[in-house]
Image (spheres, coloured by chain):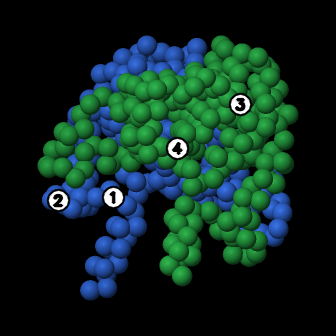
Chain colours: A green, B blue
Amino acid sequence: MCLIMEVGFGGGGGGGENNDVLVPPTNFSMAEEGIYRSGLPQPDNFGFLRTLNLRSIVYLCPEPYPEENLKFLAANNIRLFQYGIEGKTGSIPSSSIMEALKILIDVRNHPVLIHCKRGKHRTGCLVGCLRKFQNWCLTAVFEEYQRFAGVKSRSTDLAFIEKFDSVCLRQCLYSLIYHYQGYGSNKRRLLYREENLQKSRVTSR
Amino acid sequence: MCLIMEVGFGGGGGGGENNDVLVPPTNFSMAEEGIYRSGLPQPDNFGFLRTLNLRSIVYLCPEPYPEENLKFLAANNIRLFQYGIEGKTGSIPSSSIMEALKILIDVRNHPVLIHCKRGKHRTGCLVGCLRKFQNWCLTAVFEEYQRFAGVKSRSTDLAFIEKFDSVCLRQCLYSLIYHYQGYGSNKRRLLYREENLQKSRVTSR
């Protein structure tokens, strides 16, 4: 969502080629650079989603992904990662959250959109765990969860977030870094481009 | 807030140099790449704010900026833009919002944090106008406003956002683009770096 390009760069003098009103999905927000969250996108949200240039979607429901959404993903070269978490049981499997977090922290998957059905509980839990990983205090994590859940806030979700073991996630992260960058003093942020460069170097040998 | 760097890159094997819990300001959120929003930051939020590498702050209250916050800005080389909007009158001056928007859309000021006192009304109006500028439908603009204002949502604010003339803002934007890039077919996103490059070219002649 580049602000200045949004107004219609590349065209003639006065813009005008992008005057359609954009309809973000319900409960849409940017959680982090390259990480968005929302409820289930409907077809009238596809125009908006196109402006995000998504590379992947993390879908947190057990139901099959809707046919129209699958077509949108195929047409826009977006990869789907599905972690089926039941919406009503109240017990979130931490293994699914952990796997989803690994997708989120890997910038090669960015920009990524996390969504469940309403963008409140499952998405809220995943973003909450991401915040713990980022060392946010629990007060701020809960404030953010409640901003999206509103009156539907669940204490079982908050307890899940509180108990979630971010130390374990750090270990996963280090293994990810090791896999792509090796240990040592020259560790850098993992960039998709860099990995591609490395790949092409290997190929051209 | 680079995710992977957050865990403690550049240090030894196991991280550990950044284990302090981070305390984001109340009502903190990322509105857009390079644009954050919140309530008034308190001293215990400064550690968190440092992770954002802010270049500027847009402050929307008429009260003088708190002494401690001024010191934080000076120590971190952050520029303050103040647009004094009264908190309780209910009538938002659109000229102040327009000037603040010009700061927001100019990426040379990014990363920028917008804040008033609680991050609900004045900040909500400014972000709402930004969304109109981005062509968001009014339903989504209002949903976002209400997510932050909660039970304190004001219909006067919503009416202000609805009436706000984004066409005028587009004209301001074009004048900004013209100032830095000129008209023509090679218009690109305005980048701080590019402007600096141009400056140094001029200097070295």
* SS of the residue under disc 1: loop
Q: Are marks 4 and 1 in contact (CB under 8 Å)?
A: no
- Whether residue A115 can be seen here: yes
Q: Which residue is mark 2?
A: B185
**CA–CA distance between discs 2 and 3?**
46 Å
Q: Which residue is mark 3?
A: A125
Please give the label number shown on residue A49.
none
Q: Is residue B177 toward the left or the right of residue A112 in the image?
A: left
Asked if badges 3 and 4 are on one and the same chain, I answer yes
Which residue is found at the position 55% from the left and 39% from the top? A80
Residue A90 position (above or below residue B5): above
Picture coordinates of residue A96, whole percent (x, y): 74, 36
Q: Which residue is mark 1?
A: B190
* SS of the residue under disc 3: helix
Q: Are marks 2 and 3 in contact (CB under 8 Å)?
A: no
Viewer-nearest residue: B122 or B86:
B122
**CA–CA distance between discs 3 and 1?**
37 Å
Asked if badges 4 and 2 are on one and the same chain, I answer no
Q: Which residue is mark 4?
A: A79
Viewer-nearest residue: A131 or A83:
A83
Q: Are marks 3 and 4 in contact (CB under 8 Å)?
A: no
